[in-house]
Amino acid sequence: MMFAAVRASPQNVERLLAAGAAIDAVCDEKRNILHWAVLARSNRERKPAVVAQLLAAGVDPDQRDQWGRTPLDCCEEYGLEAEAEVLRGGPGGSDG
């Protein structure tokens, strides 16, 4: 699942979710799938869609990594506005 999120592949994320893939995994740095999805450097145009998918599936947007940052904090730190907007509930997000 993390690989599909990092690759920003909505189709693969959807397939994995439908197959019951675990969404609550965290890495050694305590980052969850949302952290990896927003920080990935591939397929920037598809990342907001993947973030929205993961939010809709119930991935915790409040998970803090070992440095105390949530996925939204990471977006703000790295200037990832489209992904941050989705995490805030904007277009493509859980409220928009």
Image (cartoon, helix red, strand yellow):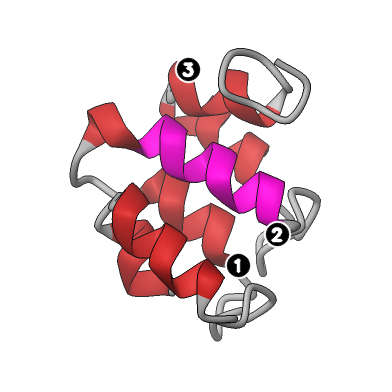
Kindly identify the amino acid type of the residue bearing the numbered disc 1: Asn
Is label 2 or label 1 in front?
2
Q: Secondary structure at mark 1?
A: loop
Kindly identify the amino acid type of the residue bearing the numbered disc 3: Glu
Residue sticking out furthest to the front: 18
Residue 13 included in the magenta stretch of the image? no
Looking at the image, is mark 2 or mark 3 earlier in the sequence? 2
Q: Secondary structure at mark 3?
A: helix
Contact flag, marks 2 and 1 (Cβ < 8 Å): yes
Q: Which residues are magenta?
A: 47-57
- x%, y% of residue 41? 23, 45
On screen, 35 above or below 30?
above
Quote the CA–CA distance across marks 2 and 1: 8 Å
Which residue lies under the disc numbered 3? 81
Q: Is residue 70 visible?
A: no
The answer to whether 21 appears left or right of 69 in the picture is left
Residue 22 occupies which quadrant of the picture? bottom right
Q: Secondary structure at mark 2?
A: loop
By secondary structure, the bulk of the magenta-drawn segment is best described as helix
On screen, 15 above or below 35?
below
- Within-10-Å neighbours for mark 1: few <14, some 14–19, many 20+: many
Which residue lies under the disc numbered 1? 32
> In percent of the image, x 73 and y 22: which residue is there?
89
Which residue lies under the disc numbered 2? 59
